[in-house]
Image (tube, helix red, strand yellow):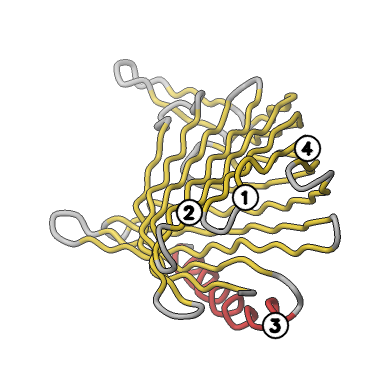
Amino acid sequence: MKHVAKILVSAASVSLLSALPAIAEDGWSGEAALSAGLTTGNTETSEAGLAVDVDRASGAWNFGLQLSGDYGEEDGIESRNRYFLAGDVEHDFNDTMFTFGRASYEVDQFTGFDSRTFVGGGVGWHILDDEDHNWTVRGGPGFKIDEVKRQVTTDANTGAVTIIPASTEESLGAVAQSEYFYAFNEAVSLSNKTNVVYGQESTQINNSIGLTAALNGHLAARVSFDVRHDTSPQPTYEATDTATKFSLVYTLGE
């Protein structure tokens, strides 16, 4: 199964990268990033990832799409397998305020959930918006659906086996996002993205901070640190995951 995942990630990466020029010509802008990591010694780990974040403006409307996939192994055993897809629609009221709708879908094999879905919308503000300094926040209500995996646990003292069947957690929720960007100069920039999805059963908090250095007109190198936290993780799962990534970034539409 892990070899199939490797093939799918590789095929998706090649297909997306080959399609980038056509996407840019169709009016989309944004970026695509390939990330990788490798350690050797007492523990051998390898990770690879692909992330695409693009948007397209049409008058007062703006359409956005984000997708990402991460796969990793530790000593030959699968240790990371996560895929994420989200779409946004925004409509500007004026230069600083807008409304938005958002839908997201996540599959992560190492969280105790088969999938996590959110649909919602609200209002956003461009707090800062100039050539070197941008900060946008948005938030609003929504609906959250978590598909919880079947759990099998064994009591360490008695050996008794407990089976918790798979279930679906549905609740009213909310989303809050912050996107910050600062350009130190024409070549080096800092970005920080925060995404909070609240639900009555659990809240997901994701943050990614990255430092990007331009290599040429469309290519850049980036080092980033990602934190993902769940306020109510499933039994036997950690509440917080972190990842340090080194990426090659291709910029579209600029």
Q: Nearer the viewer, mark 3 or mark 2?
A: 3
**Percent of width and height locating residue 154:** 39, 25
**Residue 213 vertical placement versus 171 (above, below):** below
The residue shown at (51%, 39%) is 206
Is residue 230 toward the left or the right of residue 22 in the image? left
- Circle on res. 129: 1
Q: Residues within 10 Å of mark 1 (few under 14, many from 20)?
A: few
The residue pinned by badge 3 equals: 22
Q: Amino acid at mark 2?
A: Asn
- For the residue labelled by badge 2, is the local secondary structure a helix, a strand or a loop? strand
- In primary-sequence order, the first of circles 1 and 2 is 2
Total tally of numbered discs in the picture = 4
Q: Earlier in the sequence, mark 3 or mark 1?
A: 3
C-beta proximity under 8 Å, tags 3 and 2: no
Image quadrant where one finds the C terminus? bottom right
In the rendered structure, which disc, 3 or 2, sits on the residue that comes first in sequence?
A: 3
Q: Position of residue 65 (x, y in %)?
A: 69, 58
| Residue of label 2 | 81
Residue type at the position of mark 3: Ala
* Residue drawn where x is 39% and y is 63% of the image: 188
The mark closer to the camera, 4 or 2, is 4
Of the residues shown, which amino acid type is indicated by label 4? Gly
Which residue is pictured at 85% across the width and 55% down the height? 60
Give the spatial CA distance, label 1 vs label 4.
22 Å
Mark number, residue 121: 4
| CA gap, disc 4 and disc 2 | 28 Å
Identity, as a three-letter code, of the amino acid under mark 1: Asp
